[in-house]
Amino acid sequence: MRVKLCDLKKQYKSIEKEIRSTVQRVLNETSFINGKDVIQLEKEFARYCGTRYAVGVGSGTDALEISLRVLNIGKGDEVIVPTFTFFSTASAVCYTGAKAVFCDVEEDTGNIDIEKLERYVKRSKKVKAIIPVHLFGQHCNINGIMRIARKYRLKVIEDSCQAHGALYRRAGRWIKAGSVGDTACFSFYPAKNLGAYGDGGIIVTNSKKLYTKMKMLRDCGRSSKYAHQVLGYCKRLDTMQAAILRVKLRHIDSWNKARRRNAGLYAKLLNNSGVHPLEVRKYAVPVYHQYVVRTRMRDRLRDHLSGRGVMTGVHYPLPLHLQPAFRFLGYRKGDFPVSEKLSKEVISLPMYPEIASKEIRFVCKEINKFHNKI
Ligand SMILES: *Cc1c(COP(=O)(O)O)cnc(C)c1O
């Protein structure tokens, strides 16, 4: 058997007809930039998240950078980010001239540790914002973060790039990822829970002021065709991707449901297998962008699985404070022991909505075999 980590083809085949007719329509309309599908997607995605506004942009990374810019973060400011996340959460901060201040994570979920976070906030007057990440599709303790943010008057940008549709229990209601921060950023990278057929991203917000500024910033600082109010960028979401995403948005809830069903099967079959799935908090209903387990024998288990035709991933093999690109920030090995430990123990098992339960059974059987041999 060959089991892929992620298989985009199965999903494409399941919606091929809708996609083909949509692509054909956009080709006939020839309104490739700022077309009506972009406006429609923004309305539909904002409604999906439970926010007032959304602004389509070129990628999740662009979404983060534009969010920071409209919140006036730049040189002299500090922004707290987890060190155990994807590169862009921190690179976007550095693009603005602000300093990324790394924070360690909780060992059982991989999400930012809010006790440590509050300590950094207390220590430095320069901290202006926090970018919490809903890692692998599970909410971080966003209530705790909002409480700290209010207490110290900080901005919050939710990095929801892995968490389209993830739920969080707040004041007795289930709310969607991205609905409480000043802004929230989503990526439409093809392998994300909601993926385009190319690059794309979106920012959601409840603030009309931020919305208006973000629309200008993504499109050359324009207020009209040749009136450029600010030094904006060319970071737009194109019409073709927006149209494709509108088709896919209609399926996201059923795809997330399938991911949760797959995660449930993994959890059941991996009981007593020697590997430990990340914990799920009571306040969260995750959408399993990745299905991540921990083991001290990570590299040997990966070799075993790959020999049996099972592809796996490691998210992430190196915490950001140890990445060469961030050397200039002056961090060292040992600064964030939990993240460093996780980066040696985590393994991402095959996970996508269409994976067959017999494939999951095969993966789990091989993991059990591996551990019984040792
Ligand atoms: C994917 C991702 C990004 C960046 O998204 P792109 O669309 O690739 O720019 C940022 N943060 C996190 C946590 C991500 O997973």
Image: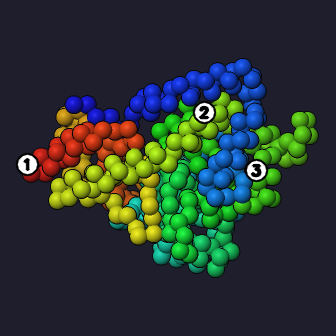
Answer with left or right where residue 3 lies relative to residue 25.
left
The residue tagged with tag 3: helix, strand or loop?
helix
What's the amino acid at mark 3? Met
The residue positioned 78% from the left and 40% from the top of the image is: 219
Residue 75 rendering spot, x and y as whole percentages: 71, 58
- Quadrant of the image for the N terminus? top left
The residue positioned farthest toward the right in the image shown? 227
What's the amino acid at mark 2? Ile
What's the amino acid at mark 1? Lys
Rendered image: mark on residue 373? 1
Residue 300 rendering spot, x and y as whole percentages: 20, 45
User: Counting residues from the N terminus, which is met first, the one under dot 1 or under dot 2?
Assistant: 2
Quadrant location of residue 118? bottom right
Q: CA distance from mark 3 to mark 1?
A: 56 Å
User: Counting residues from the N terminus, which is met first, the one under dot 2 or under dot 3?
Assistant: 3
Task: List the residue tagged with mark 2.
Answer: 244
The residue tagged with tag 1: helix, strand or loop?
helix
The residue positioned farthest toward the left in the image shown? 373
